[in-house]
């Protein structure tokens, strides 16, 4: 049996389609150059020193006390944050799916799930310091504690948990909705109490999903740079240690080796999550629930759960609100009245705010359509077409999801500062806006691709096939059928890419040069210096921009989106 | 409507086509289609029929160009087309799921292929209008596709494929999403349009009555290979294997040694009785013979050819359904218009008989 002819014909057909061919080649080149190569160069760099290939660099960094500490710190934080986020997420999801609650509470939940999406990553760290720090509003003025030290392990854990639990909540919500209520009703019917039903039916079904959520959060926590940077104090994690190794110790080779270690940890977790837990989750919970679920109305259950969740939600919302309010006080911690806009005006008059916002805005604005289009093209190729390199394209774009920004940043420094393989080729892009745009694209590509893939999977393959069959070439099929059908997903991909780019920091902070001022980097700088009011003012404007972008997207989807067009016809 | 006959219906030739797939679980390779060799004359309606998973869709998709054959060559109108991409082939496919473009209205759906071919606007207008009239959808041009019933959607899909005047029209179970009654109506419709336009059509289905009613020729497939090809009557009355006989309609098999063989006729000994059957094969006395008998070709009475015992007797309205035991073999009988006949009850002894021309020796 030989499949040679079929494969040869498939190749020939591909060659007969120059647009498709060019797209694939360009894509492979892009992915290789900007994702694989920077990671590969890290490995090469850390193994290949003055004495040829050796493990010398690794030996050196593992002898560093600070580095060993950073590893245990990172894992400890990741583990605890993973567990806490998963549990809180599960609680929220359970209440939403199982408990009859007031509309207002549902609204609170929605806000909580939205906030982390539209906020810069370190907002919670800022408000944590402002509320619970030495001069914290709550610690000093409400509780009268004057020397509360929020910096360090607990600070990171709390802030990261509050940042990441909404993701778990959304994941668990999706899973719970897929549980067929009749399974639980059967168990209840046989005499099990609610708690018993939860522990014997619901929980076992959810277990792989819980593991999945735990690992996803674990990876996020390990990769997080901004929060440990601001609230970590002397408690260093891998991401911050690598950053300091480059900016402080100027030891690029050591940083490269550390980045390899961090990458190995996240990749291992990611592999387990992707290839074991995700599959198991899908296997236990398939399909949709057949009927609506009878919601719990029993007051002894609903009241405590609703109150608990509402308080938690309010607390989270308060944390977010603290930032814009903080920017209005004359001096945080000492003088609260009268409210003033002086920090906002200082942003522009004293701290070159206009340039920072312009740079961040323009770069993100350029990056987001590229990201959105690229991720749609990748998803189209992955879902709808078959060709040899498809596996490669899919694997690399998903792999990028597991690469922490700091690792990518170090990879770009090592990979492009002196040109490709230190030969000077392409070194021109280093330090320019172009490389920042590329980083933005690479950092948002995995999320965009993932949502593009799931949107495209919903569209019957034969719709595109029939266009192809009628005589449309690949480009025509993509523009006249695929893109119009996933317009909504494309638009939200566009905005997500924009928001992610304009709030990005971990990779960017390593690559940005003085010729570009980026908001996030500015905020980080001011927060480091303890200038919280000005940091808050910057952050507030940033939140307004991202929130505005999201509102604009919702408006466009509502009025011009595909779903509306098709709905109108109904 | 002016002369809408197809410009040039094309013949299709599959020259020893095979397709190999890999089983996703075991990783083993297997033939989804194996050595399929057939010729389809221009302007004929041919059905690919067979049980689920026998390779019908795969064969059709190879003709359309979505899959590439691992062995053999496909010819369309005499030209080899193996290396052509689907958009370059003169085929048009009607999909099981209709595959209409949900963001276009009916007119734009049908006009899609013509616009790709850069047909001038007035001509598009005329051709789309004509074809919509042909499928009886005039006046629905501006509707969105989800404002149509399933049957109407299928007509749009048909119109969209027809309007580009393809050399061959491909159908992959186009009616399986419709209810039984509409299915019957649509299939006569499809046949009417195909005959009117004189177009070549290849039609995939696993419904044998659909295949019988609509086709000039049926190609019956089993596990990737052709089991039998022929006209519906040929396949029905002269199946070449138990599989074919059983797949097309209900069937009884009576086995016994051949007791005499002359030109055109043979006798098979069933439970001690020499039963005459027509045959065009040369058979040898003494070899095992297998008679294929359709249930409606058998009569049951107090006297007849073979003795039997009634095991089931069930009134079905237009016929009486019997299961009787002949020797060790179960025989199913459908006896039409039972109201005029004697009804046998379970446990009765009776006789069955049949005309020698209605029986067929495998
Ligand atoms: N892409 C694929 N990869 C591996 N095996 C496949 C693939 N597509 C089809 N097969 C297998 O090839 C065989 C033939 O499939 P095909 O779709 O042609 O069947 P079919 O006759 O159309 O069946 P049905 O009536 O159910 O549509 C089946 O065993 C199927 O599982
Ligand atoms: Mg099929």
Image (tube, coloured by chain):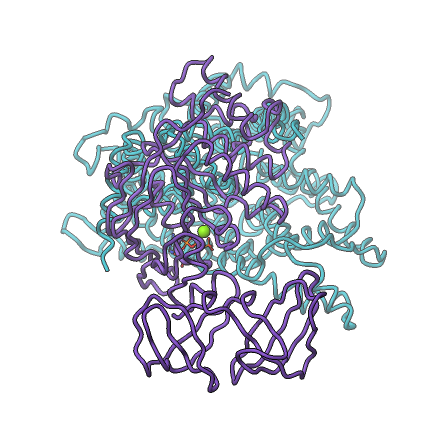
Q: In the displayed structure, would residue B257 be above or below residue B45? A: below
Hue used for the chain lettered A: cyan
Report x, y in % for residue A285.
58, 58
The answer to whether A261 appears left or right of B348 in the picture is left
For this rendering, which residue is in front, A236 or A162? A162
For this rendering, which residue is in front, B117 or A188? B117
Report x, y in % for residue B120.
42, 14
Quadrant of the displayed image that contains ligand 1: bottom left
Q: Can residue A524 be seen in the rendering of this structure?
A: no
Report x, y in % for residue B101.
52, 31
Looking at the figure, which quarter contains the C terminus of chain A? top right
The answer to whether A116 appears left or right of A462 in the picture is right
Q: In the displayed structure, would residue B335 be above or below residue A11? A: below
Outermost residue, right direction?
A299
Q: Can residue B266 be seen in the rendering of this structure?
A: yes
Outermost residue, left direction?
A51
Outermost residue, bottom direction?
B272
Q: In the displayed structure, would residue B171 be above or below residue B147? A: below
For this rendering, which residue is in front, A529 or A307? A307
The purple-tinted chain is B
Report x, y in % for residue B295.
55, 67
For this rendering, which residue is in front, A531 or A460? A460
Looking at the figure, which quarter contains the N terminus of chain A? bottom left
Number of numbered discs visible in the structure rendering: 0
The answer to whether A13 appears left or right of A91 in the picture is left
Q: Residue at x 38, y 77 (%)?
A: B289
Q: Residue at x 61, y 39 (%)?
A: B150
């Amino acid at each position: 049996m030989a499949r040679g002819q079929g494969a040869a014909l498939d190749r020939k057909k591909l060659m007969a389609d120059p647009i498709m061919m060019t797209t694939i080649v360009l894509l492979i080149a892009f992915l290789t150059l900007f994702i694989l190569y920077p990671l590969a160069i890290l490995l090469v760099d850390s193994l290949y020193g003055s004495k040829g290939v050796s493990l010398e660099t690794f030996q050196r960094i593992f002898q560093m006390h600070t580095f060993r500490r950073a590893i245990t710190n990172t894992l400890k934080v990741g583990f605890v944050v993973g567990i806490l986020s998963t549990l809180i997420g599960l609680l929220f999801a359970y209440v939403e799916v199982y408990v009859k609650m007031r509309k207002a509470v549902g609204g609170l939940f929605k806000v909580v799930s939205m906030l982390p999406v539209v906020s810069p990553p370190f907002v919670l760290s800022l408000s944590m310091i402002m509320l619970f720090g030495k001069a914290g509003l709550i610690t000093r003025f409400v509780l009268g504690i004057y020397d509360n030290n929020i910096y360090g392990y607990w600070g990171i854990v709390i802030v990261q948990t509050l940042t990441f639990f909404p993701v778990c909540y959304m994941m668990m919500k999706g899973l719970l909705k897929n549980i067929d209520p009749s399974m639980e009703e059967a168990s209840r019917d046989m005499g099990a109490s609610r708690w018993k039903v939860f522990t014997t039916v619901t929980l076992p079904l959810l277990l792989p999903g819980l593991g999945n959520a735990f690992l996803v959060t674990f990876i996020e926590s390990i990769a997080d740079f901004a929060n440990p940077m601001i609230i970590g104090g002397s408690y260093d994690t891998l991401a911050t240690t690598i950053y300091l190794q480059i900016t402080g110790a100027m030891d690029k080779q050591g940083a490269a080796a550390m980045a390899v270690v961090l990458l190995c940890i996240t990749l291992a977790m990611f592999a387990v999550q992707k290839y074991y837990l995700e599959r198991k989750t899908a296997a236990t919970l398939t399909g949709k629930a057949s009927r609506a679920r009878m919601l719990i109305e029993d007051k002894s259950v609903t009241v405590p759960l609703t109150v608990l969740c509402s308080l938690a939600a309010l607390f989270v919302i308060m944390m977010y609100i603290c930032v814009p309010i903080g920017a209005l006080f004359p001096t945080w911690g000492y003088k609260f009245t009268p409210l003033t806009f002086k920090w906002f005006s200082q942003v522009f008059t004293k701290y070159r705010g206009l340039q920072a916002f312009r740079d961040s805005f323009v770069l993100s604005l350029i990056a987001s359509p590229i990201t959105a289009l690229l991720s749609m093209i990748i998803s189209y190729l992955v879902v709808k077409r078959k060709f040899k390199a498809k596996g490669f394209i899919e694997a690399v774009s998903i792999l990028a999801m597991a690469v922490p920004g700091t690792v990518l940043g170090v990879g770009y420094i090592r990979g492009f500062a002196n040109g490709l393989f230190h030969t000077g080729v392409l070194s021109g892009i280093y330090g320019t806006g172009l490389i920042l745009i590329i980083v933005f694209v690479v950092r948002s590509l995995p999320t965009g691709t993932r949502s593009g893939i799931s949107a495209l999977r919903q569209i019957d393959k034969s719709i595109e096939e029939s266009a192809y069959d009628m005589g449309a070439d690949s480009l025509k099929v993509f523009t006249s059928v695929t893109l119009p059908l996933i317009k909504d997903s494309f638009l939200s991909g566009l905005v997500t890419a924009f928001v992610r780019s304009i709030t990005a920091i971990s990779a960017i902070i390593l690559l940005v040069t003085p010729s570009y001022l980026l908001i996030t980097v500015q905020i980080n700088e001011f927060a480091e210096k303890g200038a919280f009011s000005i940091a808050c003012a910057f952050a507030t404007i940033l939140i307004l921009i991202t929130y505005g972008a999201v509102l604009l997207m919702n408006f466009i989807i509502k009025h011009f989106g595909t779903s509306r067009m098709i709905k109108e016809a109904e | 409507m002016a002369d809408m006959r197809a410009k040039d219906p094309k013949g299709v030739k599959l020259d020893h086509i095979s397709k190999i797939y890999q089983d996703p679980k075991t990783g083993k390779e297997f033939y989804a289609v194996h050595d399929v060799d057939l010729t389809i004359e221009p302007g004929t309606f041919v059905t690919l029929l067979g049980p689920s998973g026998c390779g019908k869709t795969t064969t059709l998709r190879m003709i359309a160009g979505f899959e590439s054959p691992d062995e053999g060559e496909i010819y369309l109108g005499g030209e080899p087309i193996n290396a052509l991409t689907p958009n370059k082939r003169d085929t048009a496919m009607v999909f099981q799921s209709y595959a209409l473009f949900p963001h276009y209205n009916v007119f734009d759906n049908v006009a899609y292929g013509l616009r790709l071919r850069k047909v001038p606007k007035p001509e598009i207008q005329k051709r789309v209008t004509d074809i919509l009239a042909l499928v009886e959808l005039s006046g629905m041009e501006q509707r969105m596709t989800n404002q149509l019933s399933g049957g109407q959607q299928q007509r749009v899909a048909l119109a969209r494929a027809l309007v580009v005047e393809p050399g061959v029209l491909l159908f992959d179970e186009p009616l399986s999403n419709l209810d039984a009654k509409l299915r019957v109506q649509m299939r006569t419709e499809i046949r009417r349009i195909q005959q009117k336009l004189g177009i070549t059509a290849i039609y995939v289905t696993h419904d044998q009555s659909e295949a019988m009613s609509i086709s000039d020729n049926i190609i019956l497939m089993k596990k990737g290979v052709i089991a039998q090809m022929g006209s519906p009557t040929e396949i029905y009355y002269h199946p070449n294997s138990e599989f074919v006989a059983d797949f097309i309609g209900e069937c009884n098999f009576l086995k016994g040694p051949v007791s005499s063989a002359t030109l055109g006729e043979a006798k098979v000994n069933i439970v001690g009785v020499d039963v005459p059957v027509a045959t065009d094969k040369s058979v040898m006395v003494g070899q095992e013979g297998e008679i294929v008998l359709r249930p409606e070709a058998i009569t049951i009475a107090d006297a007849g050819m073979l003795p039997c015992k009634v095991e089931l007797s069930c009134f079905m309205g237009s016929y009486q359904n019997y299961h009787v035991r002949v020797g060790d073999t179960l025989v199913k009988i459908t006896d039409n218009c039972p109201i005029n006949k004697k009804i046998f009850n379970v446990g009765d002894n009776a006789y069955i008989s049949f005309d020698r021309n209605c029986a067929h020796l495998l």
